[in-house]
Amino acid sequence: KTFAAALNFAPHTAGHMAPEVLHLGLHADGWRRTDAARLCGYEDPIYLTWGRTTIAHNTVTVDETPMFPYDFDTESIWECDHWRDRISDSRLALFQADAAFKAMRATNDRVYEGVTLDRTVVLTNRFVIDAFRVIGRKTHRYDWAVHGVGEVQAPVDTEPCRLGTGLGYRHLIDIRRFRKPAGQVA
């Protein structure tokens, strides 16, 4: 197998960019295996309620809220870091492209107040490791979305669940939750 990965850590420079910090796109054998929101342009009726939400991308959403600068309900598609006196850029911590394996790591503590996103991806000729750490100073709800392309088998030990009707969440289908081990408190 041939694996390829794209990790979005670039600066947020334009108002029409998506709230997808540390979004991971995966390809295998020349085919896309994960994807982000697919829309028909800015006029798409679900642009603001899907494409502009973090849950529509392969990253972590905190407290069911899109990442800064899209963390509020608006009719504008042009929100931008510079309009709100804050910058949401991630930091590249590692990029290694050796013959035996490739690795990349990026962090961001600017898109969710008090939360650090830290993602490391390792690729070899046989597997992909995706280690995503989310560190918060207080209790939050963390939703880690992975949008597969094609038919995706549900992981073992999962059960159907509902996540709500907030921005982005209302568009999700076939949601699965890992079962808690016996004796573990929610």
Image: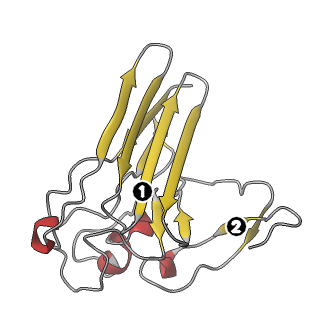
User: Marks 1 and 2: CB-CB under 8 Å?
Assistant: no
* Residue highlighted by disc 2: 177
| Image coordinates for residue 63, horizontal then vertical, percent | 48, 76
Q: CA distance from mark 1 to mark 2?
A: 23 Å
How far from the left and from the top, in percent, is residue 94?
Answer: 37, 31
Q: How many marks?
A: 2
Which label was assigned to residue 116?
1
Numbered mark located on residue 125 in the image: none
Q: Point out the residue furthest to the front here.
A: 137
Q: Position of residue 2 (x, y in %)?
A: 51, 26
Q: At numbered mark 2, what does the secondary structure look like: helix, strand or loop?
A: strand
Q: Amino acid at mark 2?
A: Arg
- Quadrant of the image for the C terminus? bottom right
- Dot 2 surroundings within 10 Å: few (below 14), some, or many (20 or more)? some
> Is 14 located above or below residue 105 in the figure?
below
Q: Tell me: residue 44, above or below residue 9.
A: below
**Which quadrant of the structure image shows residue 38?**
bottom left
Task: Spot the residue most to the top.
Answer: 99
Question: What residue do we see at 15% from left, 73% from top?
Answer: 84
Q: Find numbered disc 1 in the image and state the secondary structure of the residue it sits on.
A: strand
Residue positioned 50% across, 82% down in the render: 170
Residue 32 vs residue 167, the one in the foreground: 167
